[in-house]
Amino acid sequence: MFPRPLTPLAAPNGAEPLGRALRRAPLGRARAGIGGPPLLLPSMLMFAVIVASSGLLLMIERGILAEMKPLPLHPPNREGAPWRQALPRPGGLSLEAGDPDLQVRQDVRNRTLRAVCRQPGMPRDPWDLPVGQRRTLLRHILVSDRYRFLYCYVPKVACSNWKRVLKVLAGVLDNVDVRLKMDHRNDLVFLADLRPEEIRYRLQHYFKFLFVRDPLERLLSAYRNKFGEIREYQQRYGAEIVRRYRAGAGPSPAGDDVTFPEFLRYLVDEDPERMNEHWMPVYHLCQPCAVRYDFVGSYERLEADANQVLEWVRAPPHVRFPARQAWYRPASPEGLHYHLCSAPRALLQDVLPKYILDFSLFAYPLPNITREACHQ
């Protein structure tokens, strides 16, 4: 059945702890030596999480998990947590029977998060984080005091709909179908708005969740939306990307025709901790080691997972997660495959390390961009 959970990996003699090294150095490229060829930087931590996720996903493919009982989505009970009263008894909460891929993905996330987050030097609390990282985290966690939950929003993972739900729960909107342009700041409470003691109380006692998405699908969605539709992003980011990466672009490009490879080149040169939130890795947005989330939902089963969360927090029965609009066309696996196969493979090899923790911690397989796969 499952391999035993990973044991903590000790840093080599004389080396700094893995967590501290990960926070200090951006994932990117290093030189093998003076004059040596550039190499990717897979640290021991990266290797551990890749092995943890890839091994279990391989078990899915081979059918080893076909006879497994559904795995619980929720960690063990915490005494005194009020939202626990809204949940079924332990063992009664499970994924849909007959869907081993989803059962294993949740278990992979739980196991890999535990394995990574107990490494020496990894943060155990938001106050273990450097000031800039803590500021980013607290600005991305939304608070519902009435229903006692915290939601870390991730752009391009249905966060606008979740903000709409929070406004309905707070009584600001009548229902989730109100046709209004979403205001992403007003009438919302963020952890960053509260005092340290208020933040600590909520982190200890409230139900905490986030939603994740395939990292490259999320990047493609951000690229299509921001550079294809939003003039502000075209002027602020698109024009600079074209100036930087397109030969003969001229001093004042419009920025409305950024290519996907140009966007990827821009990401390679960006520090993940300072990226725009729409393409910042989820790890840096939500810090899943510093905050012990009770549930990690999937964009791939968005409506079911979201409505399950609403049931757990005892939202009123009339409050439901908004259905996807008929006109909305999300980035598809086929579209992603096309864009990845059209990009230089060396460029993808430079981009992937910046998102490796998102792939591994949340059980998303790395893309298959071999010549054979791209010619199918």
Image: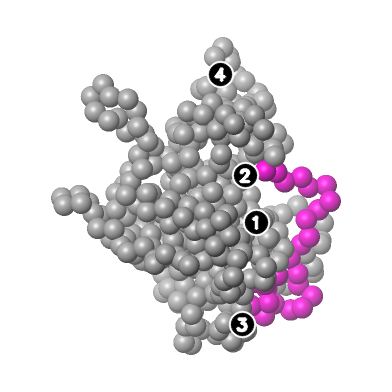
Mainly helix, strand or loop, the magenta region? Answer: loop
Q: In this view, does 139 lie to the left or right of 340?
A: left
Q: How far apart are marks 3 and 2 (CA)?
A: 33 Å
Question: Looking at the picture, which amino acid does disc 3 mark?
Answer: Gly
Colour setup of the view: one colour
Question: Looking at the picture, which amino acid does disc 1 mark?
Answer: Tyr
Which is in the foreground here, disc 3 or disc 2? 3
The disc at residue 92 is: 3
Q: What residue do we see at 67% from left, 25% from top?
A: 257
Q: Mark 1 points at which residue?
A: 299
Secondary element at tag 1? helix
One can see residue 219 in this view: yes
Q: What residue do we see at 43% from left, 41% from top?
A: 353
Q: Name the residue under label 4.
A: 246
Where residue 235 sits in the image (x, y, percent)?
Answer: 62, 30
Q: Of residues 166 and 320, which is closer to you in this image?
A: 320
Could you say which quadrant of the image residue 210 lies in?
A: bottom right
The disc at residue 217 is: 2
Q: What residue do we see at 55% from left, 84% from top?
A: 90
Question: Looking at the picture, which amino acid does disc 4 mark?
Answer: Arg
Q: Residues within 10 Å of mark 1 (few under 14, many from 20)?
A: some
First to last magenta residue range? 307-333
Secondary element at tag 3? loop
Earlier in the chain: of badge 3 and badge 1, it is 3
Q: How crowded is mark 2: few (under 14 residues within 10 Å), some or many (20 or more)?
A: some
Q: How far apart are marks 1 and 2 (CA)?
A: 10 Å
